[in-house]
Image (spheres, rainbow, N blue to C red):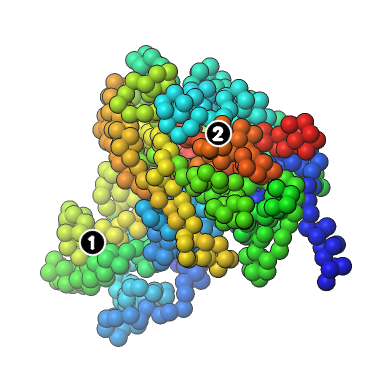
Amino acid sequence: MAYLNIDSVKERTFDAIVVGSGMSGGYAAKELCDKGLKTLVVERGRNVQHIKDYPTTNLNPWEFAHRGALTQEIKEANPVISRCYAFKEDAMQFFVKDAEHPYVQEKPFDWIRGYQVGGKSLMWARQTQRWGQYDFEGPARDGFAVDWPIRYDDLAPWYSRVEKFAGISGHADGLAELPDGEFLPAYPLNVVENYFREQVKAQYPGRHVISARCAHLSKPNPIHYEQGRVQCQNRVLCQRGCPFGGYFSSNSSTIPWALKSGHLTLKPDLVVQSVIYDEAQGKATGIRVVDAHTKAVTEYYAPVIFVNAGALNTNLLLLNSTSHRFPQGLGNDNGLMGKYVAFHNYSAHISAEYEGFKDLTTDGRNPAGGGYIPRFRNVYKQETNFLRGYAAGFSAHRKLDHTEHPIGEGFKHSLEHPAFGPWAVGSHMMAETIPKETNYVRLDPTRKDEWGMPLLNISVAYDDNDAKMKQDYFDQFSEMFTKAGFTNIKTEDSHQAPGLDIHEMGGVRMGRDPKTSLLNAASQLHACPNVYVTDGACMTSTSTQNPSLTYMALAARAVDHAVRASKGLA
Amino acid sequence: MLRRTALKNLAFFAGAATLLPGCLADAKREPPASIALKHVAVSASQEKTLAEVCETILPKTDTPGAKELGIHLYVLKMLDDCCEKKEQQAFVAGLGQLDDAAQKAYGRPFAAGTAPQKLALLQGLERQPDGSSDLASFYHSTKRLAVGGYTTGKYFLTTQIVYELVPSRYNGYFPVSKINLSKRRNGLS
């Protein structure tokens, strides 16, 4: 067998390994391949090829057996995933069903996952904002978590690099709290969104309603055509996968790009059990994987390993990567791995109506979704009874009215010839949460899944700061809506569990000091520097921005570092 | 011909349904509904009654009525597959009481009434809040599902308010006067 193994080991050795093919793993793979590294991407789920594997993408509403609705059977079998807004008949094939991959909720936590090539980048909500200086300075200024080891200027060029490739539409708004990027034309606000923008501008200095920035090709550049993507066609059926490649996903962009380079080996259906640590060499040498179907165990080797398994799964994998040197998990000398998990509080909404502009409506669909209001609380200094703040979405659309006749001929006629009602306006809160040691994930001490991985125990909850901030959002937006002349204002607290925001972060946080953090400024494990983590697990704090763009920028930056390090330059 | 078209539409539902006959519980040994139902017991004659209810809510006008479009079968399929047990039970109970209510109101089973008699009876149920009785629950469930079936169905979305799979545009300042909803879904899907 030994003679066979030599060849076999060679075949299983790469220049770099990336664990996970979602948003950040896909981006890391693209960058590694661009730099000529022979790269292996392992993905625990099945392959999903762009266009070919989007079975519902061109279906009309009436072509779905239940017109888009979930059956009661599916809802009852999947209480967790059924709470996700995108888990509907048209996209349910891309989400993990509850029974398939169990986890333990020490406290209620809706863990929303997409196990396939592309991960959740296939169904994401595509909102993309840069972090700014006030976000990176947050923990140090306000005295929570640890200081970020990087600042905005460290990441700015990498944001630019990612934005140009992915295609981000937005407007250069010139706001210190939300830096501008390399934008394709923004999707303009509609008449009522613009009206609200003007009202807020006039009555609330420092508060801004801007066009939501999103990963859609409003006007593609040559680099996007080169990826095989064309202009977004305003379908807004993105969660099904887009045949135009109108929005960015690993599937439409980074993975096919990396494959085209000839340097990528993509292996779906492989569950990574652990990162292998070699005591003699004092570094990680590869990964141990289980075939998702046959359960056969194999090892792959590389001098550089990127762990981008998706925030909590990255925690799971590293905690499970134990050795004599690292009995608590790879790089976990301080025992903090899995702790200081945080998320975004998405549990507050507000709706209202507006009676103005009745001569106007919208035509077509806006893939950006409408407006975005960057954080305006505690930006420059602490000024409220809670730490940090919230961003908010804002959108307006014209209601249709067919309630004139309740039943019969007139009723049917009104369905066919609806009248225009008032404008419906709405907002949702996207609030920063404070990472705490008491919000953690850990390996279940006894239970394992069928691939031999310990179940993940999740213990994450809201706190008093979250409650105060939510009340402030309700108060401020009720007042802003009132001053704008909106009526029928209704606040709604969804009381949803953490996790449903799908922005879980942390557990393997970056920091300056190996005693209090796991990753250094270059995204390397302090104690095992040839392992990089650039997905949600690395986040020291959460700020309010949708995080994917930052993960990708961190991935691009880390790849640059890894390549320079391999040449002795970093 | 229209009936044939309707039947063709129905093949879609029949094909999608599984093989268990709707023989649960108390359909009084009558022939079951024409489509397979897993969770609700509805007889062939009740199916006919339901078709009349749907037709009364969405009657034939210059556009096809609910019966012709098979809306009642959509109602049954959605009730069976997508509704909670509590709603299913109230629906079946209410449907079972409808003929008695019609007997009281106009001395005949529901389906045998004139169009105005049927309309008047359902208008009475419209005024009763959903959940206030099984009959009211049956009516409101039927109306909700029938309206959904009509307005998301192929006929409606290809000839009434046309659904656009690929709009390729967005204008946030579009004059209402230029919108013809009957020709265009207008991104409001």
Q: Is residue A133 left or right of residue A44?
A: left
Please state which amino acid type lies under the numbered disc 2: Asp
Q: Dot 1 lies on which element?
A: helix
Query: Residue at left 50%, top 46%?
Result: A335
Location of residue B185 in the rendering, given as x and y in whole percent from the top left corner:
47, 42
Q: Residue furthest bottom?
A: B29
Query: Residue at left 49%, top 24%?
Result: A137
Same chain assignment for discs 2 and 1: no
Depth order, front residue of A347/B25: A347
Q: Is residue A132 above or below residue A364?
A: above
Nearest to the eye among marks 2 and 1: give it: 2
Residue B163 in view of the camera: no
Depth order, front residue of B112/A190: A190
Depth order, front residue of A414/B188: B188
The residue identified by callout 2 is: A513
* Figure quadrant of residue A426: top left
Mark 2 touches mark 1? (CB < 8 Å): no
Chain letter of disc 1? B
Query: Residue at left 33%, top 29%?
Result: A386
Please state which amino acid type lies under the numbered disc 1: Ser
Q: Residue furthest right?
A: A3
Depth order, front residue of A195/B187: A195
Chain letter of disc 2? A
Task: Identify the disc placed on residue A103.
Answer: none
Q: Is residue A315 above or below residue A134?
A: below
Residue A568 in view of the camera: yes
Numbered circles on residues, count: 2
Location of residue A378 in the rendering, given as x and y in whole percent from the top left corner:
39, 22
- CA distance separating discs 2 and 1: 64 Å
The residue identified by callout 1 is: B137
Q: Dot 2 lies on which element?
A: loop
Q: Residue furthest left?
A: B104
